Image (spheres, rainbow, N blue to C red):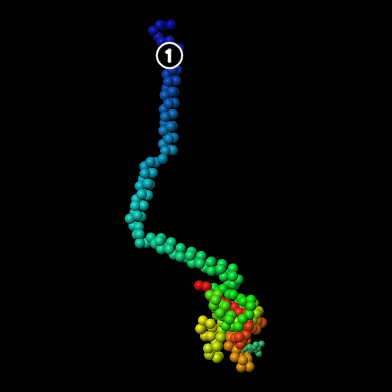
Amino acid sequence: MDKNLPDASATNRKLVVLSLGLLCILQAALNISLRLALYSSDAPDHDAVIRNLKEERDQLKRKLNTFDSSDAPDYDAVIRNLTEERDQLKRKLNIFDHYTQEGWRYFRSSFYFISSVKKSWGDSRDDCLQKGADLVIINSKEENEFTRQFRRLFWIGLTDTETEGTWKWVDGTLLSTTTSYWHAGEPNSYFSTNEDCGETKFHEVEDNWNDEKCHWQNFWICEKKVA
Ligand code: 2F8
Ligand code: CA
């Protein structure tokens, strides 16, 4: 063998070492590029985020500049109104509690006291006045039906004591023909007996009123209107 020629196996070893070295370099390069690719796809787009934030800020600034404080609700007034409404409801509730505990009946914005003893028309009225009420004034068919349901003779707040034949309620208003419920033939001042006070009498029919002598003893109904 020519000693000047390189040994074949030594050349092969060098090639193997070189190839391995190249492989390692390739591996490292691949690693680095993969990592870069991975991180860059996950990373937020800072520029875009900043752009969005700036846009939001500018929008808010624009809103603030165009904001007209005269359009804003008057919160103090709103609170004042709500407080007033609440206090009114509280007062109503207290009145309701008071009257129902005292045995009054509620119907369409009024409380009614149904007496359990009998008195003359005048004494009955005095009792109502003492209670801060008055004898019932009947303003509607429904209210008359409410009184008729008790099927009892009651004084009502109707009289013609001032002028014979001119029937007035206790608040001074004239009896209207559209809301009067005289029984057929009434009022008649029966056999000239001077019947000057109104009562509920004929329970079987809608037109149930009668005029009766005021000193007569009857049950009665007081009415207290609530606002
Ligand atoms: O109590 C007097 C009363 O007597 C009668 O009713 C029971 C008269 N009615 C008739 O006669 C139909 C009432 O007018 C009178 O007031
Ligand atoms: Ca009569």
Residue 33, picture quadrant: top left
Q: Quadrant where the N terminus lies?
A: top left
Q: Position of residue 79 (x, y in %)?
A: 43, 61
Q: Position of residue 57 (x, y in %)?
A: 36, 49
Q: Position of residue 13 (x, y in %)?
A: 45, 14
Q: Residue at x 41, y 63 (%)?
A: 77
Task: Name above or below for residue 185 compared with residue 141.
Answer: below
Q: Which residue is mark 1?
A: 11
19 left or right, relative to 190: left
Residue 177 visible? The answer is no
Q: Residue at x 44, y 20 (%)?
A: 20
Which of 83/9 is in front?
83
Residue 131 visible? The answer is yes
Which of 37/221 is in front?
221
Return the residue found at the far bottom.
192
Q: Residue at x 60, y 79 (%)?
A: 220
Q: Residue at x 41, y 60 (%)?
A: 75
Q: Disc 1 marks which amino acid?
A: Thr
